């Protein structure tokens, strides 16, 4: 999947937008990305937890040193969660000599292939 982060507000996400619409802007030294309009037929995580179309994720990317970015994401979904909640973690640059990040070839619908059997029988409920 390709994720575009628009630097000007693109408006509402298209209805067929599985990953929603991402709008990014700077707050001082922090790059903020607001993600809305994620298709509610997708899973929130690999455990199969769900979310509604109303979910909004606000990501904050802050460079804290030349080799560390602090990543923070706040999830808001009044249909699913009682209150907003936030995760935060450092992301480290790989410094090993000769390190290469190999290309990852995404397999379309791999989650359905791997985990779809756990949803079987819930198609009507999930809108499939």
Image: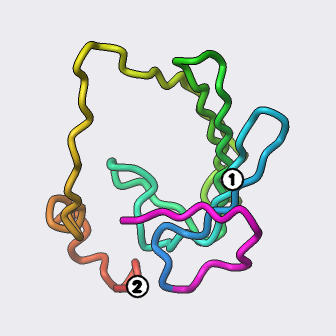
Image position of 70 with respect to 56: above or below: above
Image position of 38 with respect to 28: above or below: below
**Disc number placed over residue 127 in the picture, else none:** 2
Start-end of magenta stretch: 1-15
Q: Is mark 2 on a helix, strand or loop?
A: loop
Q: Residue at x 20, y 60 (%)?
A: 115
- 8 to the left or right of 126: right
Is 64 covered by the magenta stretch?
no
Q: Is mark 1 on a helix, strand or loop?
A: strand
Is 4 covered by the magenta stretch?
yes
Question: The C terminus is located in which quarter?
Answer: bottom left
Report the residue that reaches farthest toward the front.
98
Colour option used = rainbow
Q: Position of residue 43 (x, y in %)?
A: 41, 60
Q: Of circles 2 and 1, which is in front?
A: 1
Q: Which residue is drawn at 74% across and 36% down?
A: 30
Q: Position of residue 90 (x, y in %)?
A: 54, 22
| 24, 42: nearer the viewer | 24
Q: How far apart are marks 2 and 1 (CA)?
A: 22 Å
Residue under numbered circle 1? 76
- 33 to the left or right of 17: right
Q: Where is residue 82 in the image (x, y as percent from the top left)?
A: 69, 49
Classify 10 Å Cα crowding around label 1: few (below 14), some (14-19), many (20 and above).
some
């Amino acid at each position: 999947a390709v994720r575009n982060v628009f630097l000007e507000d693109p408006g509402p996400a298209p209805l067929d937008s599985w990953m929603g619409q991402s709008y990014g802007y700077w707050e001082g030294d922090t790059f903020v990305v607001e993600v809305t309009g994620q298709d509610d037929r997708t899973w929130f995580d690999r455990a199969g937890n769900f979310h509604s179309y109303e979910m909004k994720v606000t990501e904050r990317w802050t460079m804290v040193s030349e080799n560390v970015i602090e990543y923070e994401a706040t999830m808001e979904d009044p249909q699913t969660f009682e209150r907003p909640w936030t995760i935060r973690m450092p992301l480290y640059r790989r410094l090993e000599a000769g390190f290469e990040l190999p290309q990852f070839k995404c397999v379309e619908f791999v989650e359905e292939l791997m985990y779809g059997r756990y949803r079987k029988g819930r198609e009507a409920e999930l809108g499939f």
